[in-house]
Image: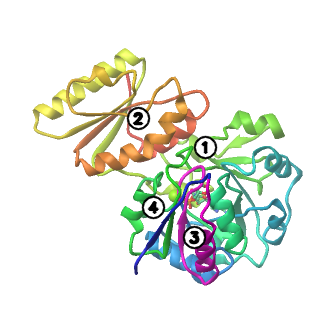
Amino acid sequence: MDTKVVRMSPDCLDMQGILEAGSILKNGGLVAFPTETVYGLGGNALDEKAAEKIYRAKGRPSDNPLIIHIAEFSAIEKIVKDVPQKAKLLADAYWPGPLTMVFEKKEIVPYGTTGGLETVAVRMPNHPIALELIRAGGGYVAAPSANKSGRPSPTIASHVEEDLGGRIDMILDGGPVGIGLESTIVDFTDEIPTILRPGYINQEMLEKVIGPVQMDKALMSVSGSIAPKAPGMKYRHYAPQGELVIVAGYPEDVQMRIRQLAEEKVMAGYRVGIIATDESAGEYPLGIVKSIGTRVHEETIAQHLFAVLREFDDSKVDFIYSEAFDTPQIGQAIMNRLLKAAGQHKIDV
Ligand code: TXA
Ligand code: MG
């Protein structure tokens, strides 16, 4: 299959391209598109066959449910049994935006979309291309991140082409995404709203609007002994080909340990990559050093994390040493993704 790529600026939409993409969705096809978090791979959420195609294109296990993207709050009524008051408050505060909420589903939502679950995840993305595509495509777009299963989520259109070129009908290329990490997922099917996946909207921002919110216990369990409530969180994601190790502690101690580790491996003939920041990149004389962003603006670290992991795959390193990024607002989400990529391998110095 030829994958058609349509480029446009989010500030100046190519409505003809979007309408064409919308009719692909209505006819059961697949279109990748930018959102404010990562690129998504869209299919008609109410068409079980489209969901099947999504799983096949990504090579994704079919028990891992898809998020339904909507463009109007009123669209939620058709797919969700009951929207609790607290969820309405969060929607008021953060939709459109990087927040996904899980509710009991109505019958119209096929099990193919929800991975067999009685619940459905819903999100209204904050991106003009995404919103217009959803409208053009019938209002309900199932969209996982547009990567091959197991690879880092795509933050630019060329990542999507690398993973899914030739396997999907169209890619809407709207340039780099803004946030770079997937949405926060909050489950409303429990008594206390529960964060299943941390994201840009953190616990404090949620609690400011609706009071107590809990973290899924599986997120705290390093050993992985507790099964996460979001089925997708149990898979080893983003794993780079090189062995990734995170080093955490005071900056000078971290830098010294990473220098030591890099020297050992380089001396032994291995290729080594280092994930540093603008502030620390000059501290590492050996290895391929990449700055992920600046600690002064933590958003830059989130924005570049997935791209840096992909770049290290391209440069075929055997080992990657990364600093830890426990930054104030997005640090929990960044570390959640980085630890997953490292198979939880972290050294505290
Ligand atoms: O930012 C995002 O959320 C991006 C963009 C494209 O919107 N999408 C995304 O989708 O990250 P995906 O499929 O890569 O991740 C969806 C996550 C998975 O961990 C899945 O298990 C969880 O959401 N999920 C979906 N439906 C669920 C449900 N009914 N109950 C619990 N978890 C659910
Ligand atoms: Mg994903």
Quadrant of image for the N terminus: bottom left
Residue 222 seen in the figure? no
Residue occupying image coordinates x 63% and y 56%: 229
**What residue is at 15 percent from the left and 40 percent from the top?**
270
Q: Earlier in the sequence, mark 1 or mark 4?
A: 4
Q: Earlier in the sequence, mark 3 or mark 4?
A: 3
Reading the image, the residue beneath label 2 is 292
Q: Is residue 209 magenta?
A: no
Secondary element type, mark 4: loop
Indicate how the structure is coloured in the image.
rainbow
**Mark number, residue 147:** 4
Q: Secondary structure at mark 2?
A: loop
N-terminal-most mark, 1 or 2: 1
Characterize the local packing of mark 1: few (<14), some (14-19) or many (20 or more) Cα atoms within 10 angstroms: many
In this view, the mark in front (1 or 3): 3
Q: Does mark 4's beta carbon lie closer than 8 Å to ligand 2? A: yes
Q: Judge from the rendering whether residue 142 lies leftward or rightward of residue 300; answer left or right.
A: right
Please provide percent x and percent y for residue 6.
50, 66
Check if mark 1's residue and mark 4's residue have beta carbons within 8 Å.
Answer: no
Label 4 amino acid?
Answer: Asn
Q: Amino acid at mark 1?
A: Gly
User: Where residue 17 is drawn, which disc sits there?
Assistant: 3
Using the numbered discs, state the Cα–Cα distance from disc 1 to disc 2 in whole angstroms. Answer: 18 Å
Ligand 1 within 8 A of label 1's CB?
Answer: yes
Q: Residue furthest right?
A: 85
Which residue is drawn at the image coordinates 44% and 41% (left, top)?
305
Category of crowding for the residue at label 2, using alpha-carbon neighbours closer than 10 angstroms: few (below 14), some (14–19), many (at least 20):
many
Name the residue beneath numbered marker 1: 199
Q: Is mark 2 within 8 Å of ligand 1?
A: no
